[in-house]
Structures are given as structure tokens and as C-alpha cells.
Image (cartoon, rainbow, N blue to C red):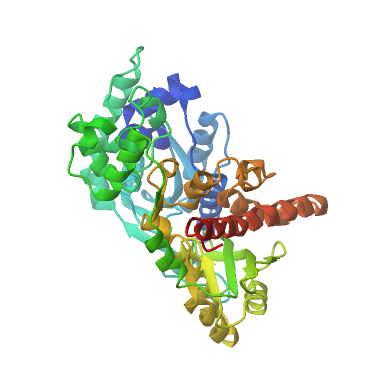
Amino acid sequence: MNLSKSKYCEGFQCKKMLWLEKNRPEEKGEESNQAVLDNGTEVGILAKQLFGDYIDIDFQDNLSGMIQDTKKVIEENEVCNITEASFDYNHNFCSVDILRKNHSSYEIYEVKSSTEVKDIYIEDASYQYYVLTSLGYKVDKVSIVHLNSHYVRQGDLSLKELFTIVDITDLAKKKQKEIKKTIQEINDYMEQTEEPKDDIGMHCTKPYDCPFFEYCTKNLEKPNVFDIRGMRSSSKFKYYDKGVYTFKDLIKEDLNDKYLEQIDFEMNEKEDKIEEKGINDFLDTLSYPLYFLDFETFQQAIPMYDGISPYGQIPFQYSLHYYENDKMELKHKEFLAEAGIDPRRSLAESLVRDIPKDVCTLAYNMSFEKTVIKSLAKNYPDLREHLLNIHDHIKDLMIPFYNRNYYTRNMQGSYSIKYVLPALFPNDPSLNYHNLEEIHNGGEAMNAYATMGELTKEEQESLRKNLLKYCGLDTYAMVKIYEKLLEVTNRR
């Protein structure tokens, strides 16, 4: 078959995944969201400038055209940087992100939008080394270029500091026999006309989650070991490998109490578990005025603003429901930054106006909100005291569910608000995120804001309205959960 570097890496992880991609594409599940793909594209474009001037090989549907264009550039230039340089050896195709030619020798640079070198990246670059050296090119160096997580932008972007270059030449050379063997194995495997019987295993999750996992496990009894919340994948596959995967089998194993409780509740359809003491202990830590806070953030692989590192969380929106006293009159404030600007300063100023000092603020899984506020305090010293006061008075609404003081079968072993909310309010359309327009989850909110500046004025107005509705529902949901805790403990 015609093998590209991406297909080689897919086949290296799991040959059946590659076979299903070709023969059962309709069974494919969800993959990376658009923001991940966009980040990779942006990083790749910027990295082309890393070594100065370059000659770009334009993408063509006809790969032979790219190969011919590459050959022409190589023949006409003694010293040059070529981006997307394309080659084919015996139906093994690759486009090198950056190829540096220095007379008769070459250097391969594989660009990744990650902040670390993963094993699969080494496979990717080693495959490219195999293709080029098999064609007779003298490759002196193979490197991975990735983002430097320690880089903090201040002023103009510094490419030399933004990117880290890791030399993997020796590793690539050592892998050449293995690469050749793997290519042959993939080609032989892909000739099968019947669906292969390969079993699932850790290769389903490493280095990436396989989009065919649901298809490959469709015949497993439900629920099974892969439905246990919080258990490591390695542990799940250990049970699976020894034939222990149904809940009926698992309940006989030496599992921790939370796993056993999930199994017990789902097998026996038990009534809700409500431990009033634990819930009351949590409620006793709260006081009025009581604020409910939720942020929405986005990330930039390439930091555009000062004080930001690659993939730093940039808050652009918050919702704030609150009770001023125990009369329980619910009020609401919100903030959504304008598109195309650094939103942090205006958000921080709004936050200190909206949340007084020394008041109790609730978040769900508070580590996220606390991290955002701490970052804002670091960047804006004049607001630091007030921001850190908010930070220090945050409590976590997740605690009663994390501790299993309140647990129902429909939570399916999870304390995530995505499971807790529908479990507590199964028939409330006002708390159903599916009923929202356009924005239904944090990923969609992040993607929407990141691209909002490219929209027309009318489209921006519509999107802003839907972003506000989504974030507002996040804190309203917290309010309802809080009220449910009061209800089950007879506090209201």
C-alpha cells in the first residue's frame, strides 16, 4: 500500500486501526477537536521561519508533483532550507517539515506542537530518515522541534526561545531495521480481506486514544471494566487480559471501595446514598454572601500576549451567580471579553468589582478557578491583593460528590458535574446543555471565542449571546446542586 508518515505511525500503534480506517471508516468515533488541529497548523507555519529564509513546497493532491518540485529545488540550490520537502521510496511517502540542505548533506527537522518529545515522534522522524537514506540522501542529523513550555513571552516573539530542538540522530539510526520490518508487516497486514481478529490492549490508548475503541469493544457485556471511573487504563487491561471484565466478575476482585460501590450500585440498582453528616460538614464551611463562579478559558500554542507560555490558560469569560444573604434571592453578573484582544486585564478588573473581599465563593473542581485567579494576580500586581483574597476564600462544591457523601447509580462512578447534574435533575430541561444553541461544552466555547474575531458583526453578536447562555448555565447548575444539598439535609 501507499504509506505516509502519518499512516506509518498509525500502523505502528495498531495495524488494525489502519485496516479499519481503510475498510470500516463509518465505524470511526470522535477524534481531536478543531482547536488541536489549528494549533498544529499554526506551530508548523511559524517553525518554517526558524532557520531564516526557506523554500516552501506547495501542497498538491498529486503527490508526484510535490516530489518533482522538491527534486527541482534540491538540484537548483547548494544550500537551502526546504519546508514540506516531499519524497517517495517504494510507495513510502513523507513530507519533511523542515529539510536543511548543505551541499551534499541534509538535516531533518520534524516539528510538533507538543511541549515534549514523545516516543511516537521519534518513530515519525525515523521513518523519514528511512525514506531519505533509502533514496541515497546523506542525512547527518535528525531532530524533533517542539514548543518550550518554560518560555514566557515578553515583547516580541522569540523563535529561538519558543522552540526547543532535540537531536535524535542516534535513535533514528538504531531504529532503521525495525522501521523496515514494521513497514513490511503493515503492508502484509493490509492485504487481508477479512477483518483481523486482533484483540484490544494498551495500544488502544498509547500514544493516542483509538477512535475505533467503541467498535472493537462492541461485543463486550455492558457495563464492563472499561466503564469503571478513575481506574487507570493499565489496570483495566490487566483485568481484561485475565478474563475479568464484567461487573459480576469484578465485584469478586480486591478493588478499592469507590470502584466496588459503583459496581454494587449499578448491578443492584440501589437507592441514592445520602450521608447527611458529611454533607452538613461541608455546608458548615460555607457562609453568606455566597458566590458561584465559573471561568471559560482558551489556549494558544503560540503565546500572543505578554506573560503567557505555550498552552497557558487565558480566561475570557466568567459567570457569577450569588446570594447576598440567606433569603436566597438569586442574582447574576457576567463578563465576556471583546474578540481579538488580550482579555485578561479587563476580566480581572471586572472580577474584583463583582466579588467583594472576604466572601465565600464556590467553584466546581476549584483547582481550575484558583489557578486562573493566581495567574491573574501574578500578572497584575495592582489587583493582586484583591484577587488573592478571592482565591483564598474559594470552596469546592465537588467535595460531597468526590467523598461520595451523595451518590446515585446514574453518576456512574463519577463526581464530574457532567454526571452529577443529570443524575440529580434528570428531567429538568433548563439544566440540559443539549438544549443550548451552538455552544454546549467548554471545548466549543474555547474554539468559538478563539475564532470570534474572524466573524461578521452579526455572527459575533449571536455567538456572544450563546456563550453567555452557556457559561451562565454552568453557574446556575452549581446553584441548583447547592440547593439540592440544602434540600436533602433539610436546611431549606
Q: Quadrant of the C terminus?
A: bottom right
At x 27%, y 26%, the residue is 199
- Using residue 90 as the reference point, say whether residue 82 is left or right of it: right
Q: Is residue 403 above or below residue 342?
A: above
274 up-or-down from 183: above or below: below
Residues 50 and 184: in front is 184
- Give the side of residue 203 with respect to residue 377, left or right: left
| Identity of the residue furthest to the top in this view | 193
Task: In this rendered view, identify the residue nearer to me: 488 or 222.
Answer: 488
Answer whether residue 134 is visible to the viewer in this image.
no
Counting from the top left corner in percent of width and height, residue 286 is at: 49, 72
Image label count: 0
Up the image or down, 29 lies above or below 323; here it is above
Residue 475 in view of the camera = yes
Q: Nearer the viewer, residue 71 or 176?
A: 176
- Where residue 413 sits, quadrant-wise, is top left
> The N terminus appears in which quarter of the rendering?
top left
Indicate the quadrant where residue 452 lies.
bottom right
> For the point 38% across and 40% down, which residue is it?
209
Residue 389 percent across, percent down from the top left: 52, 82
Q: Residue at x 68, y 67 (%)?
A: 329
Residue ID at (50%, 40%): 70
Residue 356, image x, y percentages:
62, 80
Judge whether 354 appears above or below 11 on screen.
below
User: Residue 254, image x and y in percent?
Assistant: 17, 44
Question: Residue 427, located in which quarter of the rendered image?
Answer: top right
